[in-house]
């Protein structure tokens, strides 16, 4: 037996085939007659027969058979099913590719369904019969295959003609996935894909003409030409992207799945305009959320976070892994040790199934079984489809990666799911060649019509770009926004009398503090949150340490009042729960995200960026209500070190679509929070970390503050203006306190200031700044961000560009040095500006 294994090893080395030069654990495969190799059949059969077994029946999974078909396997994972291989007339396998096929037959899939999902033989047979016994279902699958192939071929042609621009990623070879979607996914299911999503969208019910028009950048496109190839959305089909950052879609789909549970728990659902109404989902509501990801993208840490969240909350979620063996163009085994993503769920109690994408019917049968498992309420699951991509990552890629060109050519001839379908079902008499040709002709006519529609459609107007910046205009008066009519009814059935009594007492106590001028910034935000969560039951909240009230009591009593379904304690990764909030926001909810310290939002930059882009990218289809709030900024001598002292407010200034505000007082924090929760776009409120509990004040109760206005906190005297001794001071966060502490010192020296708090960093209130400069003609910016790329740099540039004629002196910026903020106060004073610097600047200007 040892001799046999050595003989095989020697034969493999002599052959010099790249088929076996793969990292260990790169995947487990079995062989069939469909592949060719430089290693002769006689060589392999001799080795196998020498140990008394035919190759496909060889029990030595970690011996000769392992060496030939599995690579160097020294982990303890269970080998994939091989018990049902047909061996009577089988020619032994031997591909000249880095990644051999798995060549599953239905019994291989059935065995996994029994073991991982608990299906009985009878149930498995019914899934098989539903496809194999129905000519209509088989034809549906075939047409979906042809639509996917035909559409992508047309895209390639139009791209080469210059009618499609930018990046484009084609799906040729992977058609069994959209065929499954067409067969087993319903309209009401939430679908989240990545940048290779044309076929997923069409299979989900998005009109092919609208998809093609979107690629042609036309106004009739699914997103009015604002999204493009990587951003296909359709609200009516619940197709929710098209996301271009690898794996970012994973937490979004988790949030969408959570929205299904929220609908059920609150007894609300979407009306014909996709707005929430006081109508419970039907008793047989079996909607799920589906998220597509490549096996390369699935190596991202978001996968583990999603599986944990989905398992914890028993989310109706399908993680559909498209396993084409390539992370972009790189062989996935070169960068990842676990290609079997479907097994990753074992740690979380999430079952998985692996199917062979070469056989579209088997993918439909096995996939439908997995989907029904989720629909039955048993929780999330993983479906991994082993497939091959016939094209490069995009038409622009040179494909110099190891083995890619040879693999692509081989896959086109040997692993085409359409050819296999046609061969199989004409050979067994289900279809005639003429029937399949007629079906293909019908589908290609639809593709041709889609191209014609796109070609003849108009381009979008230039004005549309600015119209898509925000769902709500910057000057919206949120006091005029009506509350949902169903609020009282939902509160009554979801909040117990005891819970309502407790939260009412809490709110009353905070309102008394507010009237007495004794409420803190943290408590003011907490009061606003409770008032808004009661006003609109579609409001949710996510935070770390939420049960305990986090660091500043912002989410205090939320989970105790509204339950875990609306007030979620989260894992310590802001990107994950910002992403889940995004998914909820796309599906009719108003999530609040409390960051504890806003600098932790660095973990969520991808999700924040997409939140800002969503309304525009979707052509205005999807509002993106989301309120992000937390303590941040950099106070003088705060001794928090560099990581907790970063100007995150400056980092996010460049994200389009975000409204960004600051609040240095309880009144500002309260009014802005209420408005942000009612806004239909993403908003970010920064509060000063060192003033969260110390700053106290009176609140203008029940009043929403504007999100586009600065506040004049102190007005320079008429005499100082007349004498030319008045200066406009623009500041925010801790700078407000620093300025207020030195105002008297400034006036004692015969000068005075218009002290303006920049409560709205974006959009910037240039009108208030202009009004002040018309009086003072001089401006100092006390900035809590760095010299390079800071808030002050933006404000200074706007003043110079728009108000230059009002200036008697250059804009003076007092900003943080570009060096990281030190912990030691003796060094920190050289980096962070404070009141004493302001006094000197006023005197100098």
Image (spheres, rainbow, N blue to C red):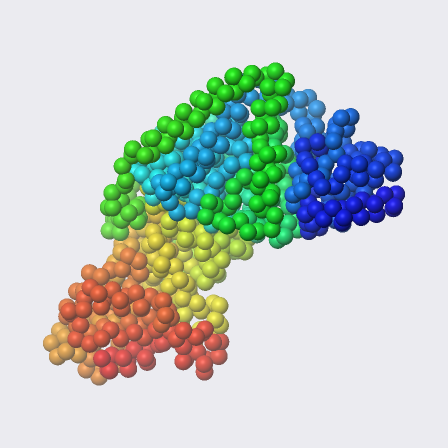
Instruction: Locate residue 149 relative to residue 485 in the image: left or right.
Output: right
Give the vertical position of 806 relative to 343 (above or below). below
Q: Residue at x 41, y 50 (%)?
A: 610
- The image shows residue 841 at horizontal and vertical percentages of 27, 79
Q: Residue at x 76, y 38 (%)?
A: 40
Quadrant where the C terminus lies?
bottom left
Quadrant where the N terminus lies?
top right
Q: Nearer the viewer, residue 827 or 403?
A: 403
- The image shows residue 689 at horizontal and vertical percentages of 42, 66
Quadrant in the rendering for residue 84 = top right
- The image shows residue 723 at horizontal and vertical percentages of 12, 79
Quadrant in the rendering for residue 672 = bottom left
Give the vertical position of 103 relative to 789 (above or below). above
- The image shows residue 500 at horizontal and vertical percentages of 44, 44
> Do we see residue 202 in this rendering?
yes
Instruction: Locate residue 244 relative to residue 791 in the image: left or right.
Output: right
Instruction: Locate residue 644 relative to residue 470 in the image: left or right.
Output: right
Q: Residue at x 36, y 42 (%)?
A: 162
């Amino acid at each position: 037996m040892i001799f046999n294994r050595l003989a095989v090893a020697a034969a493999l080395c002599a052959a010099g085939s790249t088929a076996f030069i793969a990292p260990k654990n790169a995947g487990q495969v079995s062989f069939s007659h469909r592949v060719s190799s430089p290693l002769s059949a006689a060589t392999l059969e001799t080795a196998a027969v020498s140990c008394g077994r035919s190759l496909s029946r060889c029990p030595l999974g970690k011996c000769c058979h392992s060496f030939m078909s599995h690579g160097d396997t020294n982990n303890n994972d269970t080998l994939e099913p091989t018990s049902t291989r047909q061996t009577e007339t089988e020619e032994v396998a031997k591909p000249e590719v880095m990644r051999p096929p798995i060549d599953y037959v239905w019994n291989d899939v059935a065995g996994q369904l029994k073991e991982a999902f608990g299906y009985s033989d009878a149930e498995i047979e019914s899934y098989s019969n539903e496809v194999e016994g129905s000519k209509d279902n088989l034809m549906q699958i075939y047409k979906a295959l042809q639509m996917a192939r035909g559409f992508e071929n047309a895209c390639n042609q139009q791209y080469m003609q210059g009618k499609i621009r930018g990046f484009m990623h084609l799906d040729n070879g992977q058609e069994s996935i959209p065929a499954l979607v067409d067969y087993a996914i319903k309209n009401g299911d939430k679908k989240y894909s990545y940048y290779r999503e044309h076929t997923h969208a069409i299979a989900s019910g998005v009109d092919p003409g609208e998809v093609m028009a979107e690629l042609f950048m036309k106004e009739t496109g699914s997103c009015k030409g604002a999204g493009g190839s990587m951003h296909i959305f359709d609200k009516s089909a619940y197709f929710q992207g098209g996301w271009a950052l690898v794996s970012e879609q994973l937490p979004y789909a988790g949030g969408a799945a959570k929205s299904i549970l929220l609908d059920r728990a609150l007894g609300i659902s979407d009306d014909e305009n996709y707005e929430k109404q006081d109508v419970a989902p039907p008793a047989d509501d079996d909607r799920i959320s589906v998220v597509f990801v490549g096996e390369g993208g699935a190596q991202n840490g978001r996968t583990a976070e999603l599986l944990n969240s989905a398992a914890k909350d028993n989310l109706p979620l399908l993680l559909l892994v498209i396993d084409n063996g390539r992370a972009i163009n790189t062989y996935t085994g070169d960068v990842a040790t676990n290609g079997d993503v479907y097994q990753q769920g074992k740690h979380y109690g999430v079952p998985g199934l692996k199917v062979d994408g070469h056989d579209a019917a088997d993918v439909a049968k096995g996939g439908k079984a997995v989907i029904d498992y989720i629909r039955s309420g048993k929780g999330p699951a993983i479906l991994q489809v082993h497939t091959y991509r016939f094209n490069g990552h995009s038409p622009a890629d040179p494909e110099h990666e190891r083995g890619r060109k040879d693999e692509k050519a081989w896959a086109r001839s040997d692993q085409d799911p359409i050819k296999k379908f046609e061969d199989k079902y004409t050979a067994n008499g289900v279809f005639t060649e003429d029937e399949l040709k007629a079906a293909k002709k019908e589908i290609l006519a639809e593709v041709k019509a889609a191209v014609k529609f796109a070609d003849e459609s108009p381009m979008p107007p230039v004005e549309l770009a600015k119209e898509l910046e925000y769902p709500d205009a910057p000057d919206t008066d949120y006091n005029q926004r009506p509350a949902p009519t169903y609020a009282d009814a939902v509160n009554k059935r979801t909040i117990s009398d005891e819970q309502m009594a407790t939260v009412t007492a809490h709110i009353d106590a905070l309102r008394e503090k507010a009237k007495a001028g004794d409420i803190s910034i943290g408590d003011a935000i907490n009061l606003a949150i409770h008032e808004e969560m009661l006003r609109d039951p579609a409001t949710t909240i996510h935070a770390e340490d939420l049960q305990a009230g986090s660091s500043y009591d912002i989410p205090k009593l939320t989970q105790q009042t509204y339950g875990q379904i609306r007030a979620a304690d989260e894992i310590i990764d802001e990107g994950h729960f910002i992403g889940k909030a995004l998914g909820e926001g796309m599906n009719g909810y108003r999530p609040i995200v409390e960051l504890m310290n806003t600098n932790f939002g660095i973990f969520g930059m991808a999700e924040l960026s997409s939140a800002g882009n969503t309304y525009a990218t979707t052509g205005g289809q999807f509002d993106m209500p989301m309120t992000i709030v937390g303590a941040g900024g950099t106070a003088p001598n705060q001794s928090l070190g560099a990581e907790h002292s970063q100007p995150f407010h400056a980092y996010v200034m460049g994200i389009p679509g975000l409204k960004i505000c600051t609040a240095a007082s309880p009144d500002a924090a309260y009014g802005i929070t209420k408005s942000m929760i009612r806004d239909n776009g993403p908003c970010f409120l920064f509060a000063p970390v060192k003033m969260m509990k110390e700053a106290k004040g009176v609140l203008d109760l029940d009043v929403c503050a504007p999100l586009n206005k600065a506040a004049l906190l102190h007005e320079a005297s008429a005499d100082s203006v007349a004498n030319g001794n008045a200066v406009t001071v623009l500041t925010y966060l801790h700078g407000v306190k620093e300025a207020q502490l030195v105002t008297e010192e400034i006036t004692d020296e015969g000068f005075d200031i218009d002290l303006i708090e920049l409560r709205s960093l974006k959009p910037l209130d240039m009108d208030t700044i202009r009004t002040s400069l018309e009086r003072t003609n001089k401006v100092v910016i006390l900035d809590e961000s760095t010299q390079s790329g800071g808030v002050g740099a933006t404000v200074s540039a706007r003043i110079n560009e728009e108000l230059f004629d009002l200036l008697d002196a250059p804009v003076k910026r007092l900003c943080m040095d570009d060096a990281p903020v030190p912990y030691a106060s003796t060094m920190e004073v050289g980096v962070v500006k404070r009141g004493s610097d302001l006094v000197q600047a006023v005197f100098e200007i």
